[in-house]
Amino acid sequence: MTSLFNKKFLPWLALACLVVPMFASYFFDDMFSTLSHLFDNPSLLELGWNSADYGLYTSGYSVLCVFGGLVICGMLLDKWGVRITGSIFVGMMAGGAALVAWAITSGLAPKTSLSVAYVGCMLFGLGSEIAGVAVTRSIAKWFKDGPMAFAMGLQLAIARLGTAFALVISPRLVAAKAPGEIYSLAETARPAFLGLGLMAAGMILWALFVAMDARFDRMKQSLSGGPVLRQAQEPEEEQFRFKDVLGLLKNKQFIMIALLCVFFYSSIISFKKFASAILIPRFGVPVEAASWMVSMLPFSTVVFAPLFGIMVDKIGKGTRWMVVGAILALVAHLLLAFAPAGVPFYGYLSMVFLGFGYSLVPAAMWPSVPKLVPAKVLGTAYALTYWVQNLGLMLFKMFAGNILAAKSSDAATSNAVGAVGVEIMFVCVCILALLLAIGLRRSSANRPELHLDTPST
């Protein structure tokens, strides 16, 4: 086992275990993204939800995260470690998903089923986010002196492959029907049950990772020649204190990264939730084409996120790539809002720009956090970043759903107007993200000791 450790095989095996729960989480979170157009006509759904209901349901993902849960649990992650905290919240993620699936197939009245699914989505969201923090913190630990940006980019790429899988497979699981036919509860829930199966596999591999991580700590102590120490026996300066959170809140560069995260991710993740409801009326494409169009986002990150991670590791210039990625996202949403209607080419082109931006910014942003904060509060730092991100996601999902619900009547023209209204909102969000990226770039230039633009390897 020690020889494998010396050959740096174990970190990659650990990464392989970590990516599967995230793959399952991304799949379940995006399982309705290319079916969002169905909620424009709730009379065709036995479920009975409309676009505003769907927007409310998706916003549930962020509720517990925003109202204290994410920050508190992030501190618990630093206090208890990834094995205990991560296991609790991987289980919560799966439990919340199971509750959503039950609500969809329960046959309850639409508002009642929506309420139950909303609670399930809240549990799923908090579990997913803390699991994500645990995964990111674990990668920072296992790749501390290695290709951290590449490892984070690879994890992100495979997780987003779960999104791509959802975008492509969901319209095939819930096949289009003849005009006037009703989608049954069982048909609507097919993506949810597939997601539950993926989560079961993820929980098994998480358990394997927990065993590996415990072994990893013992091996580190053995290789250093010292006894295996419990957390309570660590040097005092390495112990997490709740007052350390105040130091994070005073860190200007960390706050800028957190705000960049909320606006940049809101312009992409919130867009994906309503992808088919935007792309179909804007560019006149069928459901299958819209699903392939938006699937270009996660598919592009599968290829480019690890490559951009290598670039950040080897070349540095992380803040420069954040600026470039924010510009690409802005251009993409300008095309989605103002490009000539009914021309699919512009839809595909916008997805190309958005896909590159979706790969560049995270590849540079997430590895920057360990450069700005001490390791003992790294879990809290990521949790705070995820917290502000979820605040934006919750609000922008509700805004988008309400805009589409207010504009979506039987007329295709009204649907197109609603899609443009949502895209104008995303253009404004991208402008804010770009301003923050430029601010980080200037801050890095003025404070080179932060090493934000320094290569990692």
Image (cartoon, rainbow, N blue to C red):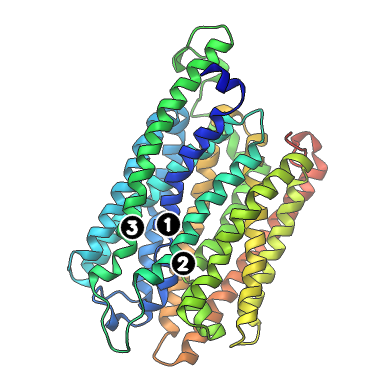
Tell me the SS state at disc 2: helix
Looking at the picture, tell me which residue is in the foreground, 45 or 286.
286
Would residue 173 be found to the left or right of residue 291 on screen?
Answer: left
Amino acid type for the residue under numbered disc 2: Val
**Residue 27 numbered mark, or none:** 1
Question: Which quadrant of the figure has residue 212?
Answer: top left
* Mark positioned earlier in the residue sequence (2 or 1): 1
Tell me the SS state at disc 3: helix
Tell me the SS state at disc 1: helix
Q: Position of residue 225 (x, y in %)?
A: 57, 6
Question: Which quadrant of the figure has residue 302?
Answer: bottom right
Q: Is residue 364 visible?
A: no
Question: Which quadrant of the figure has residue 33?
Answer: bottom left
Q: Is residue 114 above or below residue 309?
A: below
Asked if the residues shown at circle 1 and circle 3 are in contact, with their CB atoms under 8 angstroms apart, the answer is: yes
Whole-angstrom CA distance, mark 2 to mark 3, is: 13 Å
Amino acid type for the residue under numbered disc 3: Leu
Looking at the picture, tell me which residue is in the foreground, 171 or 4.
4
Q: Position of residue 318 (x, y in %)?
A: 73, 46
Residue at mark 2? 168
